[in-house]
Image (cartoon, rainbow, N blue to C red):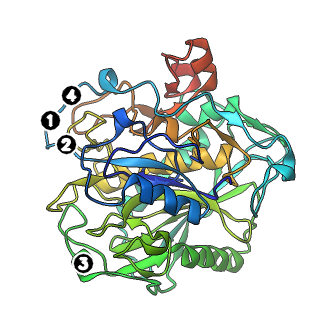
C-alpha cells in the first residue's frame, strides 16, 4: 500500500532503505529513509527502524527520513565535500499514470500535481496557530519574507523551487509559480489531544525548556478545516496550508500517550521512545493540502543525545547552526519548510506523485545536503532568493542524475548544476 503521509524524521539509529513512501527535516515526516551512510550512531534511543516502519504503515505514512544527532559545537568539516550525492535510490518515478486506479486510499488526486497550467499558481498560506501570540515578530517576519521572496522569484531558475519544473502530473507540466497568500494568525485555543509527559516539560529546546501542550494529527487537520472555513479558503490543488506551531507545543500522530510506541505513536523530539519527527506534509480528509511545522528543535540538551532538525546535524558538517538572518529558530525552520512545500508540489496526495523505488520524494533525496555555501561561519547561506539569504537543503534533479550517469542529483537550482 502506498502510504498517506510524508514525514521528516529524526532518526536515532541507522535507517535502512525500505521499499515504501518517502513530509517537512526529520524523524518520521515527509521523506524517505536515510541510507546507512547518512544515519547517526545513536542506536538504542528513540524509535527503532522496525518500529518506525511499522508506525508508518499503520498510519498510512510516507517513508522515513532521519533527522540527525548534532555534532560537538564547533566541530566543523567540509560539508560540500563530505555530503553524499543523494540519499535514496533514484531516479524519481511517476506513480499516477493510471489516475484514480493508482490510489490505495482517499483522498486521491488521481496523479495530479500542484503548480501546473490547469491549477494555476500555488498559493502558500502560512497559518501561525498561536493562541498566546508567543511566536516572535522576528520569527514570523523572516519566514514570511522567505515565502514572499520565493513567490517573487517565480519563473527564475536560481533556487530549489525551479527544480520542480522537471516534473509533471496527469494535469500537466509543473511550472514554478508561487504566490504568498494571506498570513493567518490563529488564536484558537490549543487543547492537548496527546498527553505531555512530565519528563518532557524541560530539556527539549536549546534553552532547556520543554512542552506544555500536545497536538495530534487529527486535531491539526480539524484546525486547518476550521481556519480555512472561517476565512473562505478552498481545499484544492492551488493552495497549501503551512501550519506553524508555537514553541512549547509537542506534535504526535495519535491522541493519548506520548510515552509509548503502542499503536504506532510517534512524536516530535522528546525524552520518550516516541521521539521521532520535525515536520510532515499530507492531504487531510477534506482534501486540504497541508504541512505540519512544529517549532524547531536543535541542540536539544538531553542527557542521551543532542537532537536537531537543523544545520548543526552531524552529517551536514557545519558543526553549528548557520543563521544568515540572525534568528536561529527561523533560519532552522526555513529548510524543512522548503522540503515540505517542494514535496507537496510533486506528490500532494503522497501516493500518485513522484518518488523513487525506496519511497523517497524529491526532498528526501537531498535532506541535509546543502552543497556550496557563501558568507561567514555562523551565517552561511546557499540560496539567494529575491535578494534574501537562506540556508536550505538542495532538491533532487532527475535530469542531473541521468546526465551525470547516476553520480549526482542534488542541486540548488536549475541554473546551479554542478
196 is higher (above) or lower (below) than 8 = below
The residue beneath circle 4 is: 77
Kindly give the residue lying farthest to the front in the view shown.
50
The residue beneath circle 3 is: 201
The span from disc 3 to disc 2 (Cα, nearest Å) is 24 Å
Relative image position of residue 347 (x, y in whole percent): 67, 47
The span from disc 3 to disc 1 (Cα, nearest Å) is 29 Å
Residue at the (48%, 48%) spot, across then down: 146
Tell me whether the residue at label 3 lies in contact with that at label 4, contact meaning CB atoms closer than 8 angstroms: no
Tell me whether the residue at label 4 lies in contact with that at label 1, contact meaning CB atoms closer than 8 angstroms: yes
Label at residue 148: none
Closer to the chain start, of discs 3 and 2, is 2
Q: Is residue 143 left or right of residue 274?
A: right
Residue at the (54%, 72%) spot, across then down: 217
Figure quadrant of residue 141: bottom left
Please rate how many residues cluster around mark 3, counting C-alpha atoms within 10 Å: few if below 14, some from 14 to 19, many from 20: some
241 is higher (above) or lower (below) than 395 = below
Quadrant that contains the N terminus: bottom right
Secondary structure under tag 1 reads: loop
Closer to the chain start, of discs 3 and 1, is 1
Secondary structure under tag 2 reads: loop
- One can see residue 278 in this view: no
The residue beneath circle 1 is: 75
Secondary structure under tag 4 reads: loop
Residue at the (44%, 24%) spot, across then down: 85
Amino acid at each position: 500500500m502506498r502510504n498517506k503521509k510524508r514525514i521528516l524524521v529524526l532518526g536515532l539509529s541507522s535507517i535502512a532503505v525500505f521499499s515504501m513512501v518517502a513530509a517537512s527535516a526529520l524523524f518520521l515526516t515527509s521523506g524517505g529513509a536515510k541510507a546507512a551512510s547518512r544515519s547517526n550512531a545513536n542506536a538504542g534511543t528513540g524509535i527503532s527502524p522496525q518500529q518506525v516502519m511499522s508506525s508508518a504503515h499503520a498510519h498510512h505514512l510516507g517513508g522515513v527520513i532521519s533527522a540527525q544527532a548534532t555534532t560537538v559545537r564547533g566541530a566543523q568539516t567540509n560539508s560540500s565535500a563530505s555530503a553524499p550525492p543523494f540519499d535514496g535510490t533514484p531516479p524519481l518515478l511517476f506513480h499516477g499514470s493510471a489516475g484514480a486506479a493508482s490510489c490505495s486510499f482517499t483522498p486521491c488526486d488521481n496523479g495530479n500535481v500542484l503548480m501546473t497550467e490547469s491549477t494555476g499558481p500555488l498559493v502558500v498560506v502560512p497559518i501561525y496557530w498561536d493562541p498566546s501570540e508567543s511566536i516572535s515578530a522576528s520569527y514570523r517576519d523572516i519566514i514570511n519574507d522567505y515565502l514572499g521572496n520565493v513567490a517573487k522569484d517565480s519563473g527564475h531558475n536560481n533556487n530549489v523551487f525551479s527544480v520542480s519544473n522537471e516534473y509533471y502530473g496527469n494535469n500537466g507540466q509543473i511550472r514554478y509559480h508561487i504566490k504568498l497568500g494571506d498570513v493567518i494568525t490563529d488564536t484558537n485555543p490549543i487543547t492537548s489531544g496527546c498527553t505531555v509527559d512530565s519528563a518532557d516539560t524541560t530539556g527539549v529546546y536549546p534553552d532547556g525548556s520543554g512542552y506544555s501542550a500536545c497536538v495530534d494529527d487529527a486535531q491539526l487537520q480539524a484546525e486547518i478545516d476550521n481556519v480555512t472555513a472561517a476565512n473562505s479558503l478552498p481545499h484544492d490543488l492551488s493552495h497549501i496550508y503551512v501550519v506553524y506551531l508555537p514553541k512549547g507545543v509537542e506534535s504526535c500522530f495519535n491522541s493519548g500517550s506520548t510515552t509509548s510506541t503502542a499503536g504506532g505513536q510517534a512524536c516530535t523530539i522528546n525524552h520518550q521512545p516516541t521521539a521521532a519527527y520535525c515536520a510532515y506534509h499530507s492531504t487531510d480528509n477534506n482534501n486540504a493540502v497541508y504541512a505540519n511545522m512544529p517549532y524547531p528543535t536543535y541542540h536539544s540538551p538531553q542527557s542521551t543525545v543532542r537532537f536537531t532538525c537543523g544545520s548543526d546535524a552531524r552529517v551536514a558538517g557545519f558543526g553549528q547552526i548557520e543563521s544568515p538572518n540572525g534568528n536561529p529558530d527561523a533560519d532552522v525552520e526555513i529548510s524543512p519548510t522548503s522540503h515540505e512545500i517542494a514535496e507537496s508540489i510533486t506528490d500532494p496526495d503522497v501516493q500518485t506523485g513522484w518518488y523513487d523505488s525506496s519511497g523517497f520524494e524529491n526532498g528526501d533525496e537531498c535532506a541535509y545536503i546543502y552543497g556550496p555555501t557563501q558568507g561567514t561561519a555562523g551565517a552561511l547561506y546557499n540560496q539567494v532568493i529575491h535578494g534574501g539569504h537562506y540556508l536550505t537543503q538542495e532538491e533532487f534533479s532527475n535530469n542531473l542524475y541521468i546526465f551525470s550517469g547516476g553520480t549526482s542529483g542534488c542541486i540548488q537550482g536549475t541554473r546551479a548544476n554542478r
